[in-house]
Image (spheres, coloured by chain):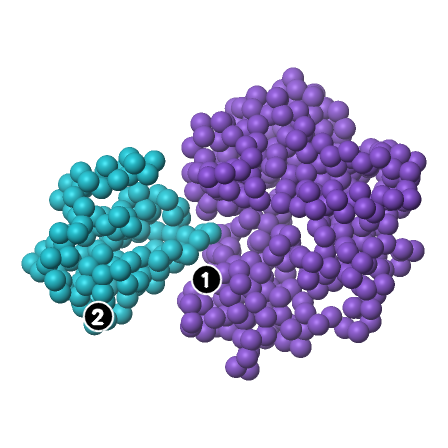
């Protein structure tokens, strides 16, 4: 198997991680089992290595204007210490990536992007920085990241620091926090649909931080958690995954992310195209499905109604919290209505399914 | 990793238990461990004539779909319908309650192509 190793590679082996290649990285798909890990994050806590994510810094007097033009969400009212999720689009409205923007100051922002897109995003950002007084730096290789997720994450992290991490609001961060004696940045964010933190640190500190968090969370029942349950967790919460629910062909409007696309902003890449999409009515929409027949819908499987193909599955698997087989699918808008009975073709057989509301899971 | 001495094995990680001209077939402990949590099993229909190397069953874990190939030829005379409601039996008891199908052996010579427990263990150590 070929791929880049994160600073926690040896730690994953030690904890029994089953290593797979993902977006050019060697990462654990699971340790004890995807379903057990999934349930730990929903009820207790799980610790993920997300060091593969990309970290790009934008600094300078023009950093805000550069970002405001780059992403579809509006960053104008952001406070220092606040984070905003946003898609980033091409001029034609297709999606380059989805990302998080961390505001350190009026002139300093951190942009966190998907691992598989780091190079593409970097090139796109450099191209779009022309004319703005902004300096971009790609610090992906100098940044490790752990995600501590689950309802007991606050209790666990609070044991390892004097900083008021329990008081960090959702989508906010503390830029300098000593956790287990290591300098970190801590944000109240995640990709699981649960409460939790993402903890950024130097690669050299990652393994010790991992061990400290695992030890601190022992009595809470923390488990090391892999990419497998990261995907089932985000899927139940209907958080999009680039390359599945978002792509160069799937605009954020089609993905149902309209609340992160501020068409009243003065200008940004894709604004005209997205306005036109909205005015004309979307041709396709990402919808949620419950598979009611016997079978599991998988990415790429055709979705049918009235005897014809009306779209395809973007993500499909069992939803462990629901105990049902669910799917997300990009469907012709004419069929995209909740309650409509459709079929998914599974290995040549049509299996019944019904369009349902998103998300499939919402924490109480 | 359990490898019962009395069974025969395929290089695709199926096991075969021969009894009175019949072959009980399942997947090995190694195979179930590689798959992870099994969440769906499609067993063959009884009376299906099957050739060695044909698809016998489809096993789905949370993340992946895997085909199980029949290690021998013959007619399916029994299928483990219990796996429809309890696919996790493949993980919990791969050599027992997790059996997949019973085939009436068409050609005893095909059994010679299968591996002994010892040879299968060697294969696993080479793959690791």
Task: Check disc 1 and report the residue beneath it.
Answer: A296
Decide which of B121, B27 is in the foreground and name it.
B121
Chain letter for the residue marked with disc 2 in the picture: B
> On the picture, is A63 further left or further right than A206?
right
User: Residue A275 location in percent, x, y?
Assistant: 83, 65
Residue placed furthest toward the bottom: A306
* Residue sitting at x 61%, y 34%: A51
Tag 1 secondary structure? loop
- Residue A349 screen position, x and y as percent: 42, 72
Point 80% across, 58% down: residue: A91
Could you say where residue A106 lies in the image, as x and y percent from the top left? Answer: 89, 36
Q: Is residue B35 left or right of residue A171?
A: left
User: Are the two marked residues, 2 and 1, in contact with CB atoms closer than 8 angstroms?
Assistant: no
> In the picture, residue B123 is in which quadrant?
top left
Judge whether A350 appears above or below A182 on screen: below
Q: Which residue is mark 2?
A: B49
On the picture, is B71 further left or further right than A262? left
Please tell me which residue is depicted at 86% across the width and 50% down the height of the picture. Answer: A69
Q: How many neighbours does mark 2 have within 10 angstroms: few (below 14), some (14-19), or many (20 or more)?
A: some
Q: Is residue A289 above or below residue A89?
A: below
Q: How many marks?
A: 2
Q: Residues within 10 Å of mark 1 (few under 14, many from 20)?
A: many
Q: Residue at x 69, y 25 (%)?
A: A184
For chain A, the rendered hue is purple
Q: Which chain shows up in cyan?
A: B
């Amino acid at each position: 198997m070929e791929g880049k190793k994160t600073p926690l590679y040896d730690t994953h082996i030690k904890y029994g991680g089953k290593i797979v290649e993902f977006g050019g990285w060697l990462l654990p798909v699971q340790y004890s089992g995807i379903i057990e890990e999934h349930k730990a994050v929903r009820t207790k806590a799980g610790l993920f290595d997300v060091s593969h994510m990309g970290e790009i810094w934008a600094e300078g007097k023009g950093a805000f204007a550069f970002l405001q033009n780059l992403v579809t969400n509006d960053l104008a009212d952001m406070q220092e210490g606040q984070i905003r999720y946003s898609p980033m689009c091409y001029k034609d409205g297709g999606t380059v990536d989805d990302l998080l923007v961390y505001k350190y100051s009026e002139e300093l922002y951190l942009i966190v992007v998907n691992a598989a897109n780091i190079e593409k995003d970097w090139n796109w950002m450099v191209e779009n920085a022309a004319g703005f007084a902004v300096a971009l730096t790609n610090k992906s290789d100098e940044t490790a990241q752990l995600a501590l997720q689950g309802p007991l994450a606050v209790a666990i992290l609070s044991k390892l620091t004097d900083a008021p991490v329990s008081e960090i609001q959702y989508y906010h961060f503390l830029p300098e926090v000593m956790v287990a004696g290591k300098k970190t940045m801590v944000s109240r964010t995640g990709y699981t649909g649960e409460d939790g933190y993402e903890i950024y640190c130097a690669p050299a500190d990652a393994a010790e931080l991992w061990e400290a968090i695992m030890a601190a969370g022992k009595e809470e029942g923390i488990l090391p958690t892999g990419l497998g349950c990261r995907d089932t967790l985000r899927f139940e919460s209907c958080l999009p995954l680039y390359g599945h629910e978002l792509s160069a062909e799937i605009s954020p409007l089609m993905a149902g992310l309209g609340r992160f696309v501020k068409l009243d902003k003065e200008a940004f890449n894709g604004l005209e195209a997205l306005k036109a999409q909205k005015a004309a009515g979307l041709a396709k929409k990402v919808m949620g499905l419950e598979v009611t027949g016997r079978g599991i819908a998988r990415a790429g499987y055709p979705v049918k109604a009235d005897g014809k193909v009306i779209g395809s599955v973007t993500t499909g698997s069992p939803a462990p919290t629901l105990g049902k087989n669910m799917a997300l699918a990009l469907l012709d808008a004419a069929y995209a209505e909740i309650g409509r009975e459709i079929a998914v073709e599974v290995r040549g057989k049509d299996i019944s399914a019904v369009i349902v509301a998103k998300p499939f899971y919402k924490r109480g | 990793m359990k490898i019962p001495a009395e069974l025969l094995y395929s290089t695709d990680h199926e096991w075969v238990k021969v009894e009175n001209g019949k072959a009980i077939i399942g997947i090995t402990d190694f195979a179930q461990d590689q798959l992870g949590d099994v969440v769906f099993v499609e067993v063959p229909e009884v009376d299906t004539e099957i050739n060695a190397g044909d698809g016998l069953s489809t096993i789905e874990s949370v993340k992946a779909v895997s085909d199980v190939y029949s290690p021998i030829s013959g007619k399916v005379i029994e299928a483990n319908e219990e796996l429809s409601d309890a696919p996790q039996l493949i993980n919990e008891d791969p050599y027992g309650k997790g059996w997949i199908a019973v085939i009436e052996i068409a050609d005893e010579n095909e059994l010679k192509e299968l591996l002994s427990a010892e040879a299968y263990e060697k294969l696993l150590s080479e793959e690791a």
